[in-house]
Amino acid sequence: MRKPAALKKGDVIIIAVLLLASLSWLAASVCRNNRNTHELSVEIYQDGQLLQTLALTDSEQILRLESAAGYNVLQIGPQGARILEADCHNQDCVHTGLQNQPGSIIACLPHRLLVCINGGKEAEFDAITR
């Protein structure tokens, strides 16, 4: 019997690029903007399931979201949403900072958590460069 061939460096790179592209597509498809409302809301997804939908209101809320992989502390208020604390090793979700634009996403991949900002008036431009 023949042994299966080992993966080469190029194979690993192609697999990593495809995985990142599929995760980006998944995040974009999960967090579709609701263009019909002018009120900003936050949708919280864990393992692809919608946990909660909360409005960005005048009162600040602090939520502790726990999973088998760890926890995240989410702050939601009139300025937007942000992850204050997490026990994941890379802390990318914490470093994302405050998000308050429709279509913005905060992702913690180790905990399989997505926080999506929806609603509001869609901006004509998302960035301007010179």
Image: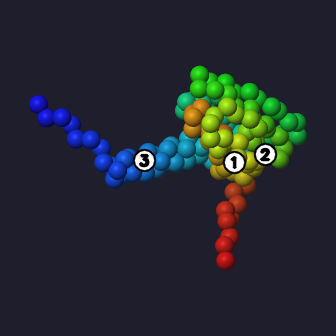
Q: Can residue 18 be seen in this view?
A: no
Which circle's residue, 1 or 2, is located before the other in the chain? 2
Tell me where residue 9 appears, x and y as whole percent: 35, 50
Which circle's residue, 3 or 1, is located before the other in the chain? 3
- State the SS at label 1: loop
Query: At x 65% / y 50%, what residue is drawn?
Result: 103
Tell me where residue 11 appears, x and y as whole percent: 33, 49
Up/down of 30 relative to 35, above or below: above
**Which label number is shown at residue 96?**
1
Query: At x 86% / y 36%, what residue is drawn?
Result: 60
Which circle's residue, 3 or 2, is located before the other in the chain? 3
Up/down of 66 relative to 97, above or below: above
**Which label number is shown at residue 16?**
3
Crowdedness near tag 3: few (<14), some (14–19) or many (≥20) residues, C-alpha within 10 Å: few
Three-letter code for the amino acid on which mark 3 is drawn: Ala
Q: Dividing the image into 4 quarters, which one contains the C terminus?
A: bottom right
